[in-house]
Image: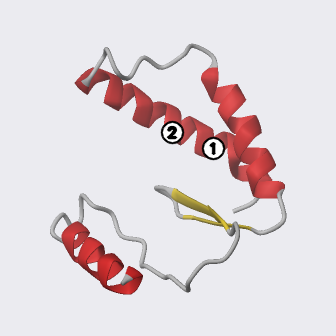
């Protein structure tokens, strides 16, 4: 994923915000015109040194190392495809952080 993908990612997040707004319109009130601002922010993040980003046709993941960290890895899977896997991830994450 590169800075050229920022507009695509911002559009994807805009669609997700619209879904969230239907569930909780008081909490999730998407600001009109925010997609362009979000695309610029993502573009700066993606262009920054130390940024690691991957994308598929359905989603993306952006990470940035800040300070000291332990090694950590996970597989990218859709929660909708594997709903029981989220608790397994949390259990693995908790074991790694101990």
Residue sitting at x 26%, y 22%: 24
Residue sitting at x 33%, y 30%: 20
Q: Which numbered marker is on residue 89?
A: none
Residue sitting at x 40%, y 26%: 18
- How packed mark 2 is, by other alpha carbons closer than 10 Å (few <14, some 14-19, many 20 or more), is some
Give the CA distance from mark 1 to mark 2: 9 Å
Is 37 or 58 nearer to us in this picture? 37
Q: Which numbered marker is on residue 8?
A: 1
Q: Quadrant of residue 71?
A: bottom right
Figure check: 11 above or below 36: below
Tell me residue 14's x, y (percent). Answer: 51, 31
Dot 1 or dot 2, earlier in sequence: 1
Figure check: 82 above or below 41: below
Tell me residue 63's x, y (percent). Answer: 62, 64
Of tags 1 and 2, the one toward the viewer is 2
Residue sitting at x 42%, y 78%: 75
Is 87 or 82 nearer to us in this picture? 87
Q: Secondary structure at mark 2?
A: helix
Q: Quadrant of residue 88?
A: bottom left
Q: Quadrant of residue 97?
A: bottom left
Q: Secondary structure at mark 1?
A: helix
Q: Residue furthest left?
A: 84
Tell me residue 7's x, y (percent). Answer: 69, 40
Image quadrant where one finds the C terminus: bottom left
Image quadrant where one finds the N terminus: bottom right
Figure check: 76 above or below 79: below
Q: Which numbered marker is on residue 13?
A: 2
Task: Classify residue 27 as left or right of residue 56.
Answer: left
Is 67 or 7 nearer to us in this picture? 67
Tell me residue 55's x, y (percent). Answer: 58, 63
């Amino acid at each position: 994923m590169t800075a050229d993908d920022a507009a695509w990612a911002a559009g994807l997040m805009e669609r997700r915000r619209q879904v969230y707004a239907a569930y909780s319109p008081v909490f999730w009130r998407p600001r009109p015109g925010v997609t362009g601002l979000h695309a610029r922010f993502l573009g700066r993040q993606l262009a920054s040194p130390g940024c690691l980003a991957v994308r598929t046709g359905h989603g993306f993941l952006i990470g940035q190392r800040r300070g000291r960290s332990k090694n950590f890895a996970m597989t990218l899977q859709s929660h909708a495809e594997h709903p029981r896997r989220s608790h397994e991830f949390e259990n693995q994450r908790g074991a790694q952080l101990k």
